[in-house]
Structures are given as structure tokens and as C-alpha cells.
Image: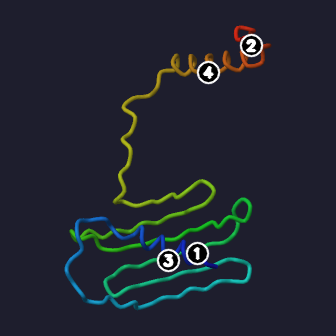
């Protein structure tokens, strides 16, 4: 239970951008909605909405390997420059996998890899496999 709550708080903390210093404001932001449901089998749902437009929705279940928690959901907020940020995510045995228009994307590889290069890579891999099956070379002996 503590882990689930800690994970939910960590998700909210990750959603907070690391822009410069915070505004000097003592205004309290109201929490408009906070719903947390924990089922007996370990499944949970979390929904949070604040007065300044932050939204978090997350669900999880112990469906991963060795009953690890698999999570999915989204968070959204408005960046200081006014850009709306929406991040959808899945966290499972393959790690944290966010999807968003605001996240950087690797450039497309500039050209197709030629077939002779792929053939050479495959040949080198086969040679490595063949060598690993051979008996030890005896090059390294005991001193």
C-alpha cells in the first residue's frame, strides 16, 4: 500500500517541470478531485485534478513478473510558457514508456543500411558463435 502511494506521488512529482525558480506566490492551489481506490487483489485507480489545471490519472495491477505492478495512465499540465503538456505512459517490466508530442524524438536514420553491411554483420555474428563452441585455445595458461 505504501509503495502504491509512493509511486503515485512520484508520478506527480515527475510531472512538475524543473523550470527556474518558482513564482513567489503563497496562493494555495485547491485539489478539486482526489480519488484513490485500492482493490483487495492489488489493483488500484488514482485520479487527481487541481485548481491550476494539473490532471493525473493512473491505474495499476500486480500483473507483471513476480507480481510487480504494471501501471498505465497520463498526466497533463500547462508549462510556464503556456504550452499544454499531455503525457501518456505505461510502466511495466520493460520500463517507463512515455508518449507525448512534447518529448524529443530521435531523427530518422538518413539512409537504408546496405545489404552487404547486414550480410557482414550476420557473418561476424556466426563466426563469434562458431568460435564460442570450439574448445579453449590454450593461449591463456596458468602462470
Give the Cα separation between the discs numbered 4 and 2.
34 Å
| Picture layout, residue 36 above or below residue 56 | below
Query: For the residues carrying marks 4 and 1, which lies nearer the camera in this image?
Result: 1
How many marks can you see? 4
Q: Residues within 10 Å of mark 4 (few under 14, many from 20)?
A: few
Dot 3 or dot 4, earlier in sequence: 3
Give the Cα separation between the discs numbered 3 and 1.
7 Å
User: Which residue is identified by label 4?
Assistant: 122
Closest to the observer, 68 or 104 = 68
Identify the residue at horizontal 47%, vertical 21% (top origin): 114
Give the Cα separation between the discs numbered 3 and 4.
45 Å
Query: For the residues carrying marks 1 and 2, which lies nearer the camera in this image?
Result: 2
Give the Cα separation between the discs numbered 3 and 2.
61 Å
Question: What's the mark number on residue 142?
Answer: 2
Dot 1 or dot 2, earlier in sequence: 1
Q: Secondary structure at mark 1?
A: strand
Query: Dividing the image into 4 quarters, which one contains the N terminus?
Result: bottom right
Q: Residues within 10 Å of mark 3 (few under 14, many from 20)?
A: many
User: Which residue is identified by label 1?
Assistant: 59
| Picture layout, residue 10 above or below residue 55 | above
Q: Secondary structure at mark 4?
A: helix
Dot 4 or dot 2, earlier in sequence: 4
Question: What's the mark number on residue 57?
Answer: 3
Give the Cα separation between the discs numbered 1 and 2.
57 Å
Q: Residue furthest front?
A: 143
Residues tagged 4 and 1 counted as in contact (Cβ below 8 A): no
Closest to the observer, 119 or 9 = 9
Amino acid at each position: 500500500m505504501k509503495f502504491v502511494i509512493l509511486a503515485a506521488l512520484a508520478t506527480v512529482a515527475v510531472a512538475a517541470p524543473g523550470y527556474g525558480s518558482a513564482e513567489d506566490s503563497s496562493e494555495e492551489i485547491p485539489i478539486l478531485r482526489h480519488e484513490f481506490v485500492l482493490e483487495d487483489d492489488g489493483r488500484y485507480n488514482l485520479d487527481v485534478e487541481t485548481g491550476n489545471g494539473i490532471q493525473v490519472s493512473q491505474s495499476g495491477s500486480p500483473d507483471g513478473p513476480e507480481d510487480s505492478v504494471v501501471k498505465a495512465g497520463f498526466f497533463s499540465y500547462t508549462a510556464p510558457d503556456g504550452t499544454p503538456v499531455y503525457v501518456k505512459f505505461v510502466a511495466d517490466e520493460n520500463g517507463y514508456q512515455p508518449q507525448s508530442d512534447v518529448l524529443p524524438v530521435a531523427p530518422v536514420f538518413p539512409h537504408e543500411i546496405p545489404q552487404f553491411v547486414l550480410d557482414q554483420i550476420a557473418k561476424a555474428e556466426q563466426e563469434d558463435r562458431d568460435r564460442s563452441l570450439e574448445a579453449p585455445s590454450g593461449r591463456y595458461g596458468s602462470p
